[in-house]
Amino acid sequence: MSSVRDKRLLGRWRLASGVRLPEYLEQLTVEFSADGTLTYRYLHDGEPTSISRSYEANGGMLSAGGSAGGQEGNTGYQFADDGSLVFDDGTRYRRMEDF
């Protein structure tokens, strides 16, 4: 992946709405780092768990590599008036400092 990144994404975001998580998953967060690493963190059966992959973000499109099966995942995103990060599937994340 190249180094194209939307700087507005940088930081840690917490799932606010839009997805029903299985009961064993709690406190889902996603962190976009300047070095191109995307890290998901959550509790799985009470144990801290994380998954990292590389990402690119440009023009409202997010591409994440290293997903299951080695395939790249792509989705659109935008920022709502309240500053929330909203993906095309309707999931909404808020910056951690907003909680």
Image: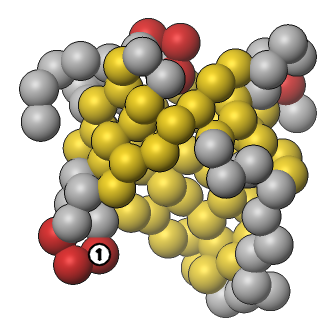
The mark tally for this picture is 1
Q: Nearer the viewer, residue 38 or 69?
A: 69
Residue 12 rendering spot, x and y as whole percentages = 59, 33
Residue 92 rendering spot, x and y as whole percentages = 76, 42
Q: Residue furthest left?
A: 2
What residue do we see at 61% from left, 81% from top? 44
Residue 57 rendering spot, x and y as whole percentages = 36, 26
What residue do we see at 88% from left, 16% from top? 82
Q: Secondary structure at mark 1?
A: helix
Q: Nearer the viewer, residue 48 or 90?
A: 90
Amino acid type assigned to the residue bearing label 1 in the image: Ala
Q: Is residue 7 visible?
A: yes
What residue do we see at 21% from left, 66% from top? 71
Q: Nearer the viewer, residue 99 or 69?
A: 69
* In this picture, residue 29 sits left or right of residue 75: right
Q: According to the image, what is the colour scheme of the structure?
A: secondary structure
* In this picture, residue 12 sits left or right of residue 4: right
Relative to 20, is 46 above or below?
A: below
* Residue on which the image places disc 1: 68
* In this picture, residue 88 sits left or right of residue 95: left
Relative to 50, is 89 above or below?
A: above
Residue 52 rendering spot, x and y as whole percentages = 33, 55
What residue do we see at 54% from left, 58% from top? 41
- Answer with the quarter of the image where residue 45 lies: bottom right
- Answer with the quarter of the image where residue 72 lies: bottom left
Crowd class of label 1 (few under 14; some 14 to 19; many from 20; radius 10 Å): few
Q: Is residue 52 visible?
A: no
Quadrant into which the N terminus falls: top left
Relative to 90, is 11 above or below?
A: above
